[in-house]
């Protein structure tokens, strides 16, 4: 079995925040689903809400190249191509658990266009690890996020992935008045006003 990328404490917070958005219009997205371990938890929580679709995005080529924003004092921790799985692995996991089929899109985030994305988003989990991946995720999700909708960014407090916090801080600086922000177990939680 592959290592879990998100701790149980973190998934508890993610599911609590997801529950707060369940009555809102819009769908649920995960940018960087990897093997789908958190995706199935999102799907389980959405099971009784047939109007809400789950969209999963990943290159399924593993991580992209890093940029300078991702460099740590200790050097580079993660390599391009790491965390590569197939979309079939994710689809199989859903089938095995008898969960409704999600929309799985195999593309680099910056290649996603309107037809790949729901028109309204109520909840987003952003877990792309690198500066540019998180920045692009914001660009795709934020214009579609409904009022009261929530974006959660994983790894905000991860010293091995400094590009994540940089992308979040820049986004918040540019959109201060539009979002409430708080941290929980190192997750960045952005709530659209
Ligand atoms: C840490 S893993 C995600 C873990 C997953 N959310 C979970 O809970 O198990 C990061 C994933 O993001 C994907 N990724 C990172 N940057 C990307 C980009 N720019 N475009 C597409 N996929 C990307 C990688 O392929 C990898 O599968």
Image (spheres, rainbow, N blue to C red):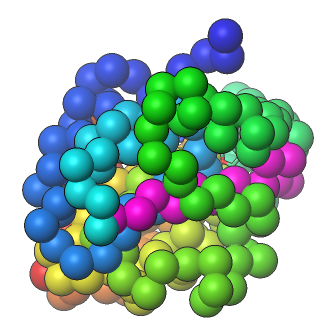
Quarter of the image for residue 16 reads top left
- Left/right of residue 6 with respect to residue 110 in the rendered view: left
Across and down, in percent, residue 20 comes to 11, 56
Across and down, in percent, residue 127 comes to 53, 49
- Left/right of residue 87 with respect to residue 101 in the rendered view: right
- What count of labels does the image hold? 0
Quadrant where the C terminus sits is: bottom left
- Left/right of residue 23 with respect to residue 32 in the rendered view: left
Height in image: 62 above or below 125?
above
Q: Magenta span has 161? A: no
Question: Residue sitting at 86 percent across and 47 percent down?
Answer: 61
Asked whether the viewer can see residue 160, the reply is: no
- Left/right of residue 142 with respect to residue 58 in the rendered view: left
Magenta segment? 52-65
Q: Relative to the observer, which residue lies in front, 85 or 153?
A: 85
Question: Residue sitting at 75 percent across and 44 percent down?
Answer: 87
Q: Magenta span has 55? A: yes
Height in image: 99 above or below 151?
above
Height in image: 192 above or below 164?
below
Q: Relative to the observer, which residue lies in front, 86 or 47?
A: 47
Quarter of the image for residue 104 reads bottom right
Q: Main secondary structure of the magenta part?
A: loop
Across and down, in percent, residue 153 comes to 41, 53
Asked whether the viewer can see residue 4, the reply is: yes
Question: Residue sitting at 31 percent across and 85 percent down?
Answer: 175
Q: Relative to the observer, which residue lies in front, 73 or 190?
A: 190
Question: Residue sitting at 39 percent across and 22 percent down?
Answer: 7
Quadrant where the N terminus sits is: top right
Across and down, in percent, residue 152 comes to 34, 54
């Amino acid at each position: 079995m592959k290592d879990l990328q998100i701790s149980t404490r973190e998934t508890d917070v993610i599911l609590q925040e997801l529950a707060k958005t369940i009555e809102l219009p819009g769908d649920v997205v995960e940018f960087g689903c990897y093997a789908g371990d958190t995706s199935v938890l999102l799907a389980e929580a959405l099971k009784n809400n047939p109007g809400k679709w789950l969209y999963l995005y990943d290159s399924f080529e593993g991580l992209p190249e890093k940029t300078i924003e991702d460099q740590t004092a200790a050097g580079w921790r993660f390599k391009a191509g790491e965390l590569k799985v197939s979309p079939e692995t994710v689809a199989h996991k859903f089938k095995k658990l008898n969960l409704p089929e999600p929309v799985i899109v195999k593309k680099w985030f910056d290649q996603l266009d309107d037809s790949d994305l729901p028109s309204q988003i109520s909840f987003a989990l952003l877990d792309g690890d690198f500066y540019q991946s998180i920045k692009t995720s914001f660009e795709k999700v934020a214009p579609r996020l409904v009022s009261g909708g929530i974006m959660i960014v994983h790894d905000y407090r991860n010293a091995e992935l400094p590009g994540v916090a940089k992308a979040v801080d820049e986004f918040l600086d540019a959109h201060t008045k539009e979002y409430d922000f708080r941290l929980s177990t190192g997750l960045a939680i952005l709530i659209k006003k």
